[in-house]
Amino acid sequence: MRVAGNLTSARRSRRLIKTRMMTSPTGVALLLLQTVCLWLVIATPVGAAPAYDNGDGEAERIFVRVGGNVTLRCPDHPQQSGQQPRHLTWWKEDRRLIEATRERVTVAPEAGARVALVPGSSALLFRSVVAEDSGEYQCVVNNRQGRKGIVRLYVQDVPDPPGIPIVVGFTSRSVNLSWTSSVNTHNSPIQQYIIHIRIGEKGDWDTRNKVMTSDNSTNFQVIGLKPFTVYSFRVLAVNAIGASKPSKESFYMVTLREVPEGKPTIVHAQNTSSSTIRIQWTAPPRHTIHGEFEGYRITYRPRDKSQEESREIVIRDSKQTQYTIRNLDTFTQYLVSLQVFNPAGRGPAVVVPVMTDEGVPSPPVNVTAVGVTDKKVLLKWREPEKPNGVLQGYYVYFQPSRNGSAQQQRRTVSHPQPIQEYALTNLRPFSYYDIWVKAFTQKHLGESSNLLKIQTDVQGPSAPIIVNLTCQSLDSLFLQWERPQTYYNKVDYYFVHYRSEEAWGFEEIAMAATDRLDHVMFIPNLTANTLYEVKVQGATRSIIDQTTVFKGQFSDSRKVLLQSKCQTFNDGAYSDPSLSAAVVAGVVCVSFALFLAIISFVLWKKYFQAAYYYLDDPPGNRASPQLSETFDDSEYASVHVSQWAKHVADLHADGDIGFSREYESLQQATDLDLSSDYSQMAENKGKNRYVNIVAYDHTRVILKPTPGQKKSADYINANYIDGYNKPRAYIGTQGPLPSTFDDYWRMIWEQRVCIIIMITNLVERGRRKCDMYWPKEGTETYGIIQVKLVQEVVMATYTVRTFAIKNIKVKKKQASERTVYQYHYTNWPDHGVPDHPLPVLSFVAKSSAANPPTAGPMIVHCSAGVGRTGTYIVLDAMLKQMRHRQSVNVYGFLRHIRQQRNYLVQTEEQYVFIHDALLEAIESGDTEVGVSQLSRYVQSLQTAQVGNTGSGDNIDKSWSLLEKQFKLVTVFKAKDFNVVSAVKPCNKAKNRSLNLIPIESHRVHITPKPGTDGSDYINATFLQGYNRLREYIVTQHPLMTTMADFWQMVWDHNSQTVVVLSVVDEKEYPQFWPDADEEQDYGSFKVKPTSDETATTASTDTAPADEKPTGGPGLVSRDFILQSTQDDYELSCRVIQCPGWPQACTPMATLFDLIRTVAARHAEDLNGPVVVVDKCGGTEAATFCCLSALYKQLESEKCVDVYLYAKLYHMRRPGIWKSQDDFLFLYRSVESLLAVSNGPAAAPILANATNGQLTSNGHAVKIEEVAGKIESPD
């Protein structure tokens, strides 16, 4: 049955019904409604799909995400009616889903359990919708048809994966991709795409750092890629529901090359000589090369040259990590740059400044003699044209030119001037001398000047000898005398002086001398019966100034009474003197013979019965004498320690004339012809480092024979040397040669050596002084001895190495491993002596105490094994004698041991140093204090004593050990020549205070400006730390006029940490670093900040948990970059500001928080010193440096030596310790650290420490009862 009428009429009828429902009575309305419904039911056949009304009615749209539940309400059946229609059918397009009557509900099989009617209503319920549920649904109530019953359901899901991305273009850092859109977007349009990136063929997809497109375009450029890198890509489509699955990945592609981005890291850059620089580096990360890694490019130039003058070295080996640059200028700072390169070009350069070592100064210029006397020559010269370093002084060499056996001598001229004058004294009259001069730097002895030949002037002759004085007549005397025994050139005149008994003065008669051995004279016009006194004097005319005559010594006076019975002159009387001369000659000969016999007996007794004298069987099979038990120094005067200061002062008087005489006497007394036949054997000469340094036969160390060896194979250039109260306490030897390494270690094994003392560097002044006879690392075998390097501890002035040695030829039970310690002093200059004895005394004490009582001799060597070796032995022996006998006998002991090895204490300068060092040891005492004794020691420092203070007034006064120590610490007073640069008129304004200025030898130099006098000066001083000689720079707060100099100093010396202790204000102490948004330009470099300031109350990250501070000043850290304006060199620098330190630190132990922070930062730096700034470069800065060094010493050695560091600092920067309180503060600070912490002090002192055994770090520890050993000052 088809529906009659048209829809327009039906709609009009429905509107009519609605109108009537609003106006007619209820019953009429219901009847009309039923009539209409019946008409609709009749019009639609049962079971047929409803027809769609495409009129102006709109279907309801419902959206739901896949997997969700949704309810479709029937538009034709109001839900609020609460009644289920008689007949209800839900259609999806042309398929019936569900049909319900009041009796039953029928669900289509394909709908399944996911579809149901809501009980009590006509709504359709979907559970867990799927994408296929999308479509148009129609609800038919009681078989009524109409557009209003239609509901459109849209199930939304993520899109299908897009198409595979295709690379359509790329550069070194970007890729252009294109892809096709998703086939099905699942009822939600694509909003954008996600791009995943994978590096490498087997890498992981980077899903964390995904790339998002801004729209749904299917073309995109990926940027931010890395050059020369393998990439692949995949794409995900994104709609409102989420992201699709990834597309298939693209094909692999490689971005283009670029010039390298990474810099190599220079880990080591130093000079290896005056003309070579060695650099060592690590390669930059591989991903920063951006291409094939082809190698390195090194450029270098002097710092004052332009970039165009750089020289280039290309290394085409990417695996190489070190290079030595050669043929450089001496003592020149070079900028060395290093960069990598690939086919695309070169990367950024890393630049380091390195200065070549000091070289050999050229000869002094125009050495002339401007004044000559009988014993003195005044020399004058100009400084070398090429100093090749900082001149430390000159050596003046002189030698008698007509005496082939005479030994050359040397004098030292300190504090060099551009035009130098020097008085060479204590010469011999009327002697020819060869004189030459050499300049020296810290490391090198310069070339010799032209030889200057001079002849000293004459001196007056010795006394004539009056042989006859008789009466010639009643008014005259006859006088006869012999020529003086000593005269120079000749005797030109004689002066006869006579006077009567009553006269006050002498009359003088002059006469010219002749070549006769005797002279006569008649003295006329005298008075009879008068007693006359007569004496004679010779004279010699100057060979330099003929108008000058030098009178000699007077003869002994002779008296005669002029009277009538006086003996008269006759011929016989005139001939008697010759007879007298013969008699006298006979007496002299007998006396001389007797003298020779006595001398022979004394020498025999000394050589065959002296203490510890040892005679081996030389080639002549002579018998060996027995060793005596003790050394008796009664033959030479010992000096009590209380008189040592006066004794040394007397020797220093008049330009060290006392030392010169005593050392010359020592040289003559020990110039003995002792045999050294084994050293001179042809097969042994190659075992001697120097041809003139031999081993005496009677004390040489004899190596034990091995099967089949020659007798000469027992030779090594080494001698036994006695110590104090101990025979053969030392073995003095040369620095081993490569050919003698096996013999050297064999000697160590055979002699049971435990301690080796080495006092030389391997290379000095560019010359090989000693060869490296130990393994650099691991194990080496030298002959039959296996040597293993166990540990190496490096300190500022010396290094301690621990070796384990084993004899590989001995049976296992007997071949027990032994431990040998090498104490290597590294700060003894290759000329002269150390500038202060305190570090040497500390080294001697620790190394000597480390030798166990049961061990064999200590080996002591330098290069030749005589000069510094002898100095060490004499110091060690005399320190022991001081402790046991309270006396010192340097001369006697040295004279004794010089008979055991030649030339011990080789120079007068070393001889003087020994005396000064022993004086320091006597005055200061033992100042190294163990942690267990520190509190008692600090208490004893402040305890009042009663006694003589040593001031010279011999009055007992109340004093303290602290007072005495402080006076000794600050005894040095700077002279004008010590501060010559600081007080120059052009530099005075650069100093905040003239009371705190640097000593010339320790001041910090900066790059000078050509033509500007004093431009290398800054008020800054190098100070020694625990690990390095130049570990710190102490300086004043920069003035407005010196800020550029300050940053130039940081730049020149690669300082990467600056500690500021002064309080910054706008007037007196201005800020000297740029603000966050600024940079400071200083010509050759710029300073700019790299991070914002970081403020903390305390930096304790490196402190142990129980050392966390409870208070203290805040720290502010700022990071800066110093960047060259001429190349790519950069220097990072951190400024750590801690105003109020140490005064604001409460409790006191918190002041070590800053020290720990700086130590941790400095450990990350390269080799630059820490710059410490306070107001004037004084007490606060020095206290920081001193406590930093003591903190490290406490950690390493479990003891502290406050006195040593305080005195060394004062020597370098006088004025830093203003009062005893400053000095006491150092002790109290360390004491407070131990009081609140079990940190460094907690490590137990070894039980055998008092025996001088070594701790695990290689240091000798000796703990003594300090409080019980306090004595009054001398």
Image (cartoon, rainbow, N blue to C red):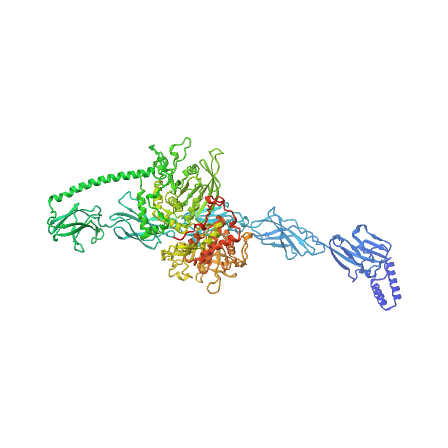
Residue sticking out furthest to the top: 708
x, y percent for residue 1118: 52, 58
* Closer to the camera in the image, 448 or 173: 448
* Closer to the camera in the image, 658 or 527: 527
For residue 338, say whether it is visible: no
x, y percent for residue 81: 83, 61
Side (left or right) of 213 relative to 604: right
Question: Up-down: is 632 above or below 1141?
Answer: above
* Closer to the camera in the image, 499 or 353: 499
* Closer to the camera in the image, 755 or 335: 755
Question: Up-down: is 1027 above or below 1175?
Answer: above
Number of numbered callouts drawn: 0
x, y percent for residue 1020: 43, 57
Side (left or right) of 180 relative to 108: left
For residue 164, say whether it is visible: yes
Image quadrant occupied by the N terminus: bottom right
x, y percent for residue 491: 19, 48
